[in-house]
Image (spheres, rainbow, N blue to C red):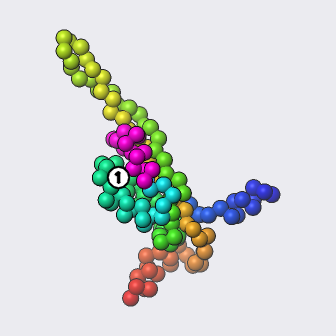
Amino acid sequence: MANDAASAEELPRAVARARYVHMTPMKTRRVVDLIRGRNAQEALAVLQFAPQAASGPVAKVLASAMANAENNLELDPDTLWISAAYVDEGPTLKRFRPRAQGRTYRIRKRTSHITIEVESLLPATPKGGTAQGRGRASKKEGAR
């Protein structure tokens, strides 16, 4: 019973992941920490002007999560906020560099898995109709 009540009050959430991103998790986590808990539109603006190289892939994942929420769950993009954002370590590519006196030096090229979950502040309201009747076509009619 208690489990049913918790799931009924759970807000709709959309997830996006980028796997095997050729960037170290430590550097990527610095950027993800900037946007965690923010409004999704505000977080995109922060990422656009962040000087770190990891802000590009993180912005793409955030934009994908927002698009998933809008197109798959029919959520308003203005009400989205980042409920969870984390970076996991992916596989490490091992390369070798020659060093002095015939020795080698191991180069570790680390990869990351970036995950961002966005949630709507308002519960989703079903709009009715078929899946084809909703979405882009109805938005164009309202814009005219």
Percent coordinates x, y for residue 118 in the rendering: 51, 60
Q: Residue at x 58, y 78 (%)?
A: 127
Residue at the disc numbered 1? 55
Quadrant in the rendering for residue 7? bottom right
Task: Name, please, the residue furthest toward the right.
Answer: 1
Is 10 placed left or right of 85 in the picture?
A: right
Q: Over which residues does the magenta segment extend?
A: 18-34
Q: Residue at x 31, y 49 (%)?
A: 52
Task: Name, please, the residue furthest toward the left.
Answer: 101
Quadrant in the rendering for residue 93? top left
Is 104 or 134 nearer to us in this picture?
104
Rendered position, 142 above or below 135: below
State the quadrant of the N terminus. Answer: bottom right
Percent coordinates x, y for residue 45 in the rendering: 37, 63
Is 132 placed left or right of 110 in the picture?
A: right
Task: Name, please, the residue furthest toward the top.
Answer: 101
Q: Amino acid at mark 1?
A: Ser
Q: Residue at x 41, y 34 (%)?
A: 91
Disc 1 on helix, strand or loop? helix
Q: Residue at x 37, y 60 (%)?
A: 46
Quadrant in the rendering for residue 102? top left
Note whether residue 137 is visible.
yes
State the quadrant of the C terminus. Answer: bottom left
